[in-house]
Amino acid sequence: MSVPRAKRVIFSDNDMNMLVDLVYKYKHIIECKKTDALTWKDKDATWIKISDAFNASVMEKKTPEQLRTKYDNLKKDARRYFAKQRQDIYRTGGGINKIAEMMMTKLELNDGTEANLHRFKHRRLQLASYLVTFQPQQC
């Protein structure tokens, strides 16, 4: 008999923003490089605190494991995005890369709704850059 798979968790953009803001409050614990038993207990307790704060303001409750996985995936996506951006810069020899060119043409050609979408994407880019620039704490 197989074990049923867990339900797929969907995070809205507001949920992701809230998660990043909550993690920022506890970044000195979450991003600590120490790996002893006491540090792991502190990290687990911190993720439970984050989960409680997160669940207090959303309709669909999430477990600490789901929040931790989402946070790790956000960091991975941010690293991939900036690695791709660095590759494009070196590929063009320092000129305008494809990503910047596409953003500029979208803003010039489309109406205000596309500009709002661009602002939203810019906010997600800010979150991504914030996640990548997290400096692991020396505890």
Image (cartoon, rainbow, N blue to C red):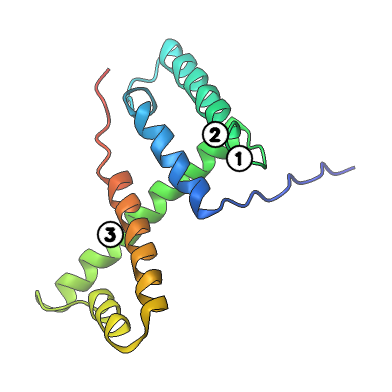
CA neighbours of label 2 inside 10 A, class few (<14), some (14 to 19), many (20+): many
Question: Most extreme residue toward the front, as rendered?
Answer: 112
- Residue 80, image x, y percentages: 35, 58
Q: Are marks 3 and 1 in contact (CB under 8 Å)?
A: no
Q: Quadrant of residue 86?
A: bottom left
Q: Is residue 105 left or right of residue 112?
A: left
Mark 3 or mark 2: which is in front? Answer: 2
41 relative to 8 in the view: left or right: left
Q: Can you identify the residue that label 2 sits on?
A: 54
Q: Earlier in the sequence, mark 3 or mark 1?
A: 1
Q: Residues within 10 Å of mark 3 (few under 14, many from 20)?
A: some
- Residue 33 in percent (x, y) is at 32, 25
Q: Position of residue 59 (x, y in %)?
A: 66, 41
Give the amino acid at mark 1: Val
Query: Residue 15 in the image: x percent, y percent?
Result: 52, 46
Nearer the observer, 74 or 119: 119
Location of residue 81 by image quarter? bottom left
Q: Which residue is mark 3?
A: 82
Q: Who's the residue at 58% across and 31% down the image?
A: 64
Label 2 sits on a secondary structure element that is helix
Task: Name the secondary structure under disc 3.
Answer: helix
Which numbered disc, 3 or 2, marks the residue that appears first in the sequence? Answer: 2
Q: Which residue is mark 1?
A: 58
